Amino acid sequence: MKNYSLWRLSFILVIIISAITFSIPTLFYNSNNENWFFEKKVNLGLDLQGGSHLLLEVKNEILLKEEINNISDFVRKFSREERITLISLEIKTDELLIETSNKLDTDKLVEFKNKNYPRLNITRNDNNLVFKISDSHKKNLFESAINQSLEIVRKRIDESGTKEPLIQRQGIDRILLQLPGIKDPARIKNLLGKTAKLTFHMVDDENLIDLDNSSPPPGKMIIKDNLDENIKYLVEVRIRVGGENLVDAQPTYEQGSPAVSFRFNPLGARKFGKATSSNVGKRFAVILDNRVITAPVIRSAITDGNGVITGNFTIQEAQDLSLLLRAGALPAPIEIIEERSVGPGLGADSINAGKIASITGLILVGIFMFLTYGILGFIANISLITNLFIIISSLSLIGVTLTLPGIAGIVLTIGMAVDANVLIFERIKEEINRSNHLITAINNGFKKAISTIIDANLTTLIAALLLFIFGSGPIKGFAVTLSLGIVASMFTAILLTNLLTLIWYNSTKPKKIMGFNV
């Protein structure tokens, strides 16, 4: 106990200095200061500072159109394979009108429908068929689309899980989104407005047709360039690799310019390797939301499943594109049907009340500790203040948005932070009562209390982690502040209080402690 290892001392000093340093942006933030350092601060939630309110609508009619088009493609493919003569095939919003040349062909199509699409309604009149999407199938499609859209919107807006936007489903096809203190609503709307459907196609440079005035040959389509609509590409309809095979995408640099690196899963890597190895020297188009981002020439086979997308991006565009690809494609486009600014629901009064509660709690706990444990209580108070700095700096570094539940978590942490010190000091009292020497009593007090401290805090930490995993919005904010407070209090109680007690003992050689003569 009399000697404290250099590495422990260095570790404690680094944590304390870092905590104080990274608390400065939050404690002394000035909106006129554009220094990058002051951007790392604790942000306030919608209930404390206001923000943007958006109402989104999933375009289910496009979802139905895609579904009926997919069914139509399979019907055509089946008809070619079975040599069925289709006199006509008409696509409507939610139904497919088919006319065949004879009864046998009609029977084959009915059998095909019953085997592959049992949830489609069918109407037959001689050799005329109507395949219609049933109400139950529509309900399942819409339910799946809104749930998938909710998750993707959450990933796009709050990938780290710390900004605490309010994202709620409303009705069959709407999503309510509230964003606290948003600085760039245009960028957010741009992120939400993109379906982010990524596909890879081969470019056809052999058919020299007028892309402005000619129709594409069978199996081909004409796609415009992402940056210049006057530039068009003739590409295969066939998708060589789809965005669903991506497992990661990150912003990077390629020849000094911002780009996006991507990585496929094993299936996507095999498809990508096969496509590039058999088409060396040809162009490979990367298409996002029906626009060609880039169409590089394949120089060699790419079999490791990794690649880079270039396209004259800015740094922000590269970051946004990588985020969109990581989050996945929306099942259907989303339209913003309502947008408004929201004032703080509780605002300055709640912030002031939270400050008063925190400061009052801190003062009362400090007085209690000092009156009960004397100089050791004063040391515990120093640890408590350090604990608050650690919490604030940690919240600043990870960019947490603080709401009222988060403030409640901090206030709760103030009360819990001294628990470990109380356990240690009470254990020291017991050791002194056993007529142990002071240094031995202090040493045993810390040593024997550690297991109890860890057990008590670990159970609370598990509960906080479960709240974070299964909760959302404000519940996550409460869990984050509580978890950080638990970790910080364990650090200050086990290491910092130990160090300060040692410094006090070595410098004063006390004869009396907590009312005991030693």
Image (cartoon, rainbow, N blue to C red):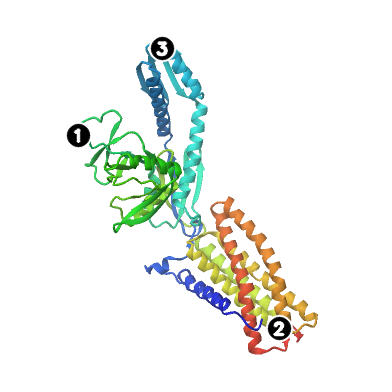
Q: Quadrant of residue 235?
A: top left
Residue 13 picture quarter: bottom right
Q: CA distance from mark 2 to mark 3?
A: 99 Å
Q: Is disc 2 placed on a helix, strand or loop? A: helix
Per the image, label 3 sits on a secondary structure element best described as: loop
Q: In this view, which residue lies farthest toward the right?
A: 434
Q: Helix or strand or loop: what does disc 1 sit on?
A: loop
Q: Is residue 82 left or right of residue 46?
A: left
Task: Tell me the kind of residue under disc 3.
Answer: Asn
Q: Between residues 443 and 254, which one lies in front from this camera angle?
A: 254
In the displayed structure, would residue 219 be above or below residue 160?
A: above
User: Which dot, 1 or 3, sits closer to the camera?
Assistant: 1
Taking 309 as reference, is 1 above or below it?
below
Is residue 170 visible in this depiction of the protein?
Answer: yes
Q: Considering only order in the chain, which callout, 3 or 2, is on the residue closer to the N terminus?
A: 3
Is 458 displayed left or right of 346 in the figure? right
For the residue marked with disc 2, what is the amino acid?
Ile
* Residue 106 vertical position relative to residue 359 in the rendered view, above or below: above
Q: Position of residue 444 (x, y in %)?
A: 72, 77
Whole-number angstrom distance, CA of label 1 to CA of label 3 = 41 Å
Q: Pointer 3: what residue?
A: 127
